Amino acid sequence: MEINRLRSFAAVVKYGSFTKAAEQLYLSQPTVSTHIRALEEQLGCQLIVRTTKSTEVTPKGQELYSYAAGILELWDRAVRACRDAERKIIHLGASTIPSAYILPDILPEYGKRNPNTYFVIHQSDSQGIINGLEENLFDLGLIGMRPKSAALDSRAFYRDNMVLVTPVSPKYLSLQAHPATAVQELLKEPIILREEGSGSGKNAANYLERMGISERDLHVVARVNDQEAVKNLVAGGLGVSILSEKAAERFVQEKRLLQFELPNAVPRDLYLVWRKGTVLNGNVWEFMTFILKTQIGKEDERVKYPDI
């Protein structure tokens, strides 16, 4: 079966018109008609009933269309994969912390060593990247939580801490002299939390749960899906927040935020994630190896370099 015939058929069904299908495919209308006739002859059944007033899809045509969308998507992915392998293009899905604070450090150095490798980066929260990997949209994901999906495999590559950040003011500066009780007092303040799909949000929720603190007991003034927005809102005085130490680092250095260590906090890992059973091409494998060799151990020697 020629893929162009199937593409013409799918377009006619989608747009309900041979003319519109031809326009969308940049083909002539007779060419689209020829594709449909050839497909019907090949399959031995009528797919589309065309009259002077309408275009109707037969039951067999509807059945074929249900398969055609998936076939065309797989074909386009295969073509893109071949082209990307030739060009050394890597499709990355990255959640907020890796995309904003890890990749900017990694990619310039990797680019010096591999000048012919290019990256297409899609940013979302951790759950969004997991969903994209399950749908085979990315070669590799970098996220802030271990995926539970049976379709994915993962390796820790970076260790980070969660900290509590506040505006810079005499009130909060005075609490720095009493670190043992500061966090308990600060959690009574208006607090800004991340959205539920983020790794940072999940880790903050896990910490509060371990400390026996329910979100119902907090004065939540906002739930924000952007880490930079959270920092700016805190710096502007809206409230306090629990953030990645890596994300807060620059604002703390610039004295725009105050940082408080969370008692009994467990460091969290960032993960490289990919589809199980996928044969990673040489470009992706090489990039994964580079990340693991350069990042593991920087933050905590307990994170060991795994086999991949």
Image: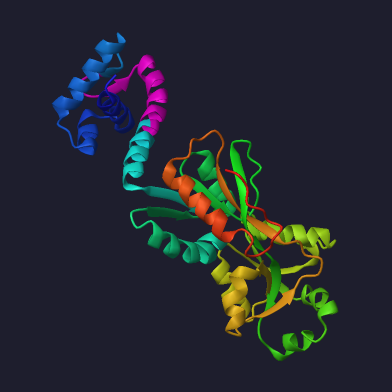
Left or right of 267 in this view: 210: right
**Residue 15 found in image quarter:** top left
Q: Is residue 16 above or below residue 254?
A: above
Does the rendering let one see residue 95?
Answer: no
Numbered range of the magenta stretch: 50-74
When asked about the image quadrant of residue 167, the answer is: bottom right
Task: Indicate the quadrant containing the C terminus: top left, top right, bottom left or bottom right.
Answer: top right
Q: Is residue 239 depicted above or below 224 in this figure? A: below
Check if residue 188 falls in the magenta segment.
no
Residue 57 lies in the magenta stretch? yes
Q: Does residue 298 lie above or below 7 as drawn? A: below
Question: Could you say which is closer to the camera, residue 133 or residue 86?
Answer: 86
Q: How many marks?
A: 0
Q: Which residue appears farthest toward the top when viewing the image?
A: 44
Q: Residue at the spot x=55%, y=53% of the render? A: 142
Quadrant in which the N terminus is drawn:
top left
Q: Is residue 215 left or right of residue 281?
A: right
Query: Which quadrant would residue 204 be assigned to in this image?
Result: bottom right
* Position of residue 83 measured from the top left corner of the image (x, y, whole percent): 31, 41
Residue 189 as seen in the image, left or right of residue 135: right
Magenta portion: prevailing SS class: helix
Q: Position of residue 113 (x, y in %)?
A: 40, 59
Nearer to the camera, 54 or 89: 89
Looking at this rendering, what residue extends furthest in the bottom direction?
A: 170
Q: Residue at x 24, y 33 (%)?
A: 21
Asked whether residue 129 is in view, the answer is: yes
Q: Position of residue 200 (x, y in %)?
A: 65, 60
**Residue visible at 82% across and 63% down in the picture:** 213
Viewer-nearest residue: 262 or 24 = 262
